[in-house]
Image (cartoon, helix red, strand yellow):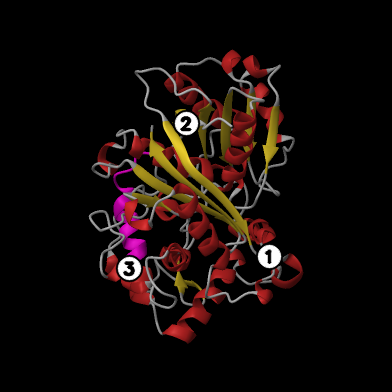
Amino acid sequence: MTTPHIIGWGHTPFGKLDRIDIEQLIRDAANPALESAGLEARDIDGVFVGTFNAGFVPQDFSASLVSVAMPEFRDTPAVRLENACATGSAAVWAALDAVESGRCQRALVIGFEKMNTLPSAQVGEVLLKCSYVREDGDTPMGFAGVFGRIAGEYFDRFGDQSDALAAIAAKNHRNGVDNPYAHMRRDLGFEFCRTASDRNPVVAGPLKRSDCSLVSDGAAALVISKERGGSNRPAIRWRSRTQVNDFLQLGKRDVTRFEGAAKAWERGLKSAGIGLGDLQFVETHDCFTMAELLQYEAMGLAEHGQGARVILEGISTRDGKLPVNRSGGLKSRGHPIGATGVSQHVMAAMQLAGQADAMQVPGARLGAVFNMGGAAVTNYLSVLEAA
């Protein structure tokens, strides 16, 4: 088995990109990834595409769009992966399998999504397909309603967590100011995020608009190789990678715990031969602020019901013991579904290569990426290190 390396990456700005079509998004992510790896299209043995779609755009057969966008990939095998909001990580995993097995020497991963093609209500309907539709398909306010229910049950059991959720939102928006790719580069501040208003209305349960990730368009790409790459290019490698699934039906689970995520963290850290304290940063899946709070508990930063203390004591802030979402996370960077998992790995690679500029965590040599599909139904954890 070969330990794969990330040797190149590309990332488009995330946002409402009405004038940019999917083909252009593919080019804008793939070309910088190839260039930074010092490669051309003919050097790539397989392309792995992550996109959720599910009705955002009429065009499907998404893997074949790569050769439409870039004719030089005409003969290159390409396949599309989908796993809800962890679609990007599913594409990364497939590329890793191909490289580790020896079937591919170099693979290109492209994650993309165009979400701003539909009115808000229809976007919500599409996203609800990431739930068990038979049980939750009529949830008001779409997936925000699902997480509103989760937050409500957590509040009922452990008390009002509004201060913690507002602090998470404010942290991630402040971090996003430093990210040139972020959808919203605006420091909203704690008071704005804490207070319901016309500009920050209550959306579902105790969640306000500032607790919800953005509806974004964008793309990101990685070049994964069994070779380390040239001496002038930083290389990042996997210390471990883990996937753990849980029930899709929330009725079969304690929704105040992300048990699948906790198992992914436990197994991933053990496989990497490290403890949580060995990490210098984490990029995690804050589709809603409540998700980040529950992930603090899943990763082991706090006991069940005590996640609020992680943010309120400053542990996860930019200067804290374990900075979480120094890129701004999904909350500020944006959440184009298929691009998210790839984007998170790009953000981590930039940190470990010392190329994160204003986002840089000093001395970052070991970090983790957590990406989940649905409400912690499919859970992916990468522990990455500078090679």
Depth check, front residue: 237 or 193 = 237
Q: Pointer 3: residues within 10 angstroms few (<14), some, or many (20+)?
A: many
What residue sits right under mark 2 in the picture?
6
Q: Position of residue 225 (x, y in %)?
A: 53, 26
> Which element is circle 1 on?
loop
Query: Mark 1 near mark 2, Cβ–Cβ under 8 Å?
Result: no
* Residue 310, label in figure: 3
Amino acid on which disc 2 is placed: Ile
Hey, what amino acid is under mark 1? Leu
Task: Using the numbered discs, state the Cα–Cα distance from disc 1 to disc 2 in whole angstroms.
Answer: 31 Å
Q: Main secondary structure of the magenta part?
A: helix
Q: Which residues are magenta?
A: 167-180
| Amino acid carrying mark 3 in the image | Val
Tell me how far mark 1 sits from mark 3, CA to CA: 28 Å
Q: Earlier in the sequence, mark 1 or mark 3?
A: 1
Task: Look at the image and say whether residue 52 sits in the magenta stretch.
Answer: no
Above or below residue 85? Residue 254 is below
Q: Nearer the viewer, residue 56 or 38?
A: 38
- Label 1 belongs to which residue? 248
